[in-house]
Amino acid sequence: MSASAIDSVPAVDESSVSLPAWIYRDPEFFELEQERILRTSWQLVCHVSDVPQPGDYHTFEFLGESVIVVRGEDGQVRSFYNVCRHRAARLLDGPKGHCGRRITCPYHAWTYATDGRLIGLPQREAFKGLDRTLHGLAPLEQEIFLGFVFVRFAPGLPSVRDMAAPYLDELTAYRFEALVPQGRVTLRPRSVNWKNIADNYSDGLHIPVAHPGLTRLFGDTYGIEAGPWIDRMWGRLSETPSRQWSEALYQRLLPQVGHLPQDRQRVWVYFKLWPNVAFDIYPDQVDFMQFLPISPTETLIREIAYVHPDDRREMRAARYLNWRINRQVNREDTELIARVQIGMGSQSYTVGPLGQSEVCLRSFARRMHSLIPQSREPRAPGRGWSVGHRSR
């Protein structure tokens, strides 16, 4: 390829091309998208069943912030910043735990009730005029949707319920409120930009090329659609037994699920909530994933599985086989996104054409363009381009 071919960018309709490669590695863009996209987005912390008793808590780390979700003595689930109001010490450690009837700071022993009220501090006489009602734990905006606890750090988006409204009837059939955790939260580091993972999740074209297991399971039934705030992908389990033993055994052993309608019994469906939260919904379990940005080229994939209590041997076997099948899918995706991230650094690549069927990538790009107009530029502006575009 000649230098002129590399340097030139064809004039195309922006709705028909991908997001430009430079925004998958640019530090200034990363700072701006944290402010305009990620801080205003709903982030899933846990399910209410993760904090079943008063004093149970779950933590979440995001964009340098630490969050506590705790069940109070009154049974209510609340979300707070995991920060003491005295000297900013972290209050609770670990991904989850039990704090009893109060939260006590390990630095100076300021003490809070599980509803966030400041209820005690040593040497109170040294804090003349302190109004304890003004120094309780700082709350976050919280929404509990179908049993899942979401928080956000700044306003901007509709509620989770409103965003999910087009699919509410379908989601309700899975009785999310009755789910319980299976295992623990895991964090998988990936040396890629978070958007690379989000793109791959909603990309239907790579399924028959890169995921032979899913192709054997679904045949040609894999579908994809893009809503205003949610991407939806799905595949129906084939009646033709797979030639791979774990897939064939899953097809054969997967039992009927009493609360699901018949047309849901053999369907795997995937939902991605703008911009970085995803649910893999199977008849046997529900997995959630988040793509947590660490830097322009580093992301943590945070995930946990939830299930309905079911002691049937067939169900236990199906859940193991599900894990085995998807472990291979994860390996395949890990290699794919690494290949893409490397390619995004090539001077030969600016944007790529999107096919008519790539509706989710088109939708994601449109929203990114509207929130950060510089994402329309095929090549990065000069250094310092974002100065003046950030909130003051």
Image (cartoon, helix red, strand yellow):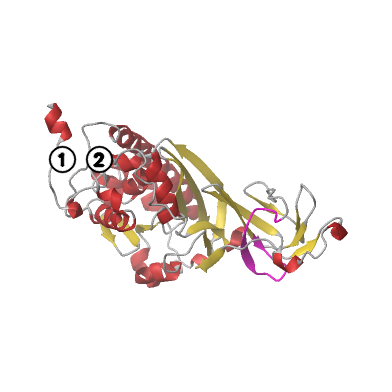
- For image coordinates 12% across by 32% down, the residue present is 5
The answer to whether 253 is drawn above or below residue 6 in the figure is below
In percent of width and height, residue 71 lies at 66, 64
Q: In which quarter of the image is residue 142?
A: bottom right
Label 2 Cα neighbours within 10 Å, binned few <14 / some 14-19 / many ≥20: some
Circle 1 residues within 10 Å: few <14, some 14–19, many ≥20 = few
Q: Nearest the camera: 129 or 277?
A: 129
Residue placed most toward the observer, 17 or 197: 17
Q: How many marks?
A: 2
Kindly state the secondary structure of the residue where label 2 is placed. Answer: loop
Residue tagged 1: 9
Residue 173 seen in this snapshot: no
Of label 2 and label 1, which has the lower sequence position?
A: 1
Q: Position of residue 48 (x, y in %)?
A: 59, 63
Q: Does the magenta stretch include residue 176?
A: no
**324 w.r.t. 346: above or below:** below
**The disc labelled 2 sits on which kind of residue?**
Arg
Q: Tell me where residue 237 appears, x and y as whole percent.
A: 31, 55
**Residue 154 badge:** none
> Gap between marks 2 and 1, in whole Å?
9 Å
Magenta stretch: give its range.
70-85
Indicate left or right for 295 with 216 as reference: right
* Of residues 284 and 229, the one drawn nearer to the viewer in this rendering: 229
The quadrant of the image that shows the N terminus is: top left
**At which x and y percent is residue 30?**
40, 44
**Which residue carries the number 2 mark?**
379
**Residue at 55%, 52% in the rendered image:** 182
Is there a contact, CB below 8 Å, between mark 2 and mark 1? yes
The relative height of residue 73 versus residue 360 in the rendered view (above or below) is below
Q: Is mark 1 on a helix, strand or loop?
A: loop
Identify residue type, mark 1: Val
Residue at figure coordinates x 76%, y 48% from the top left: 106
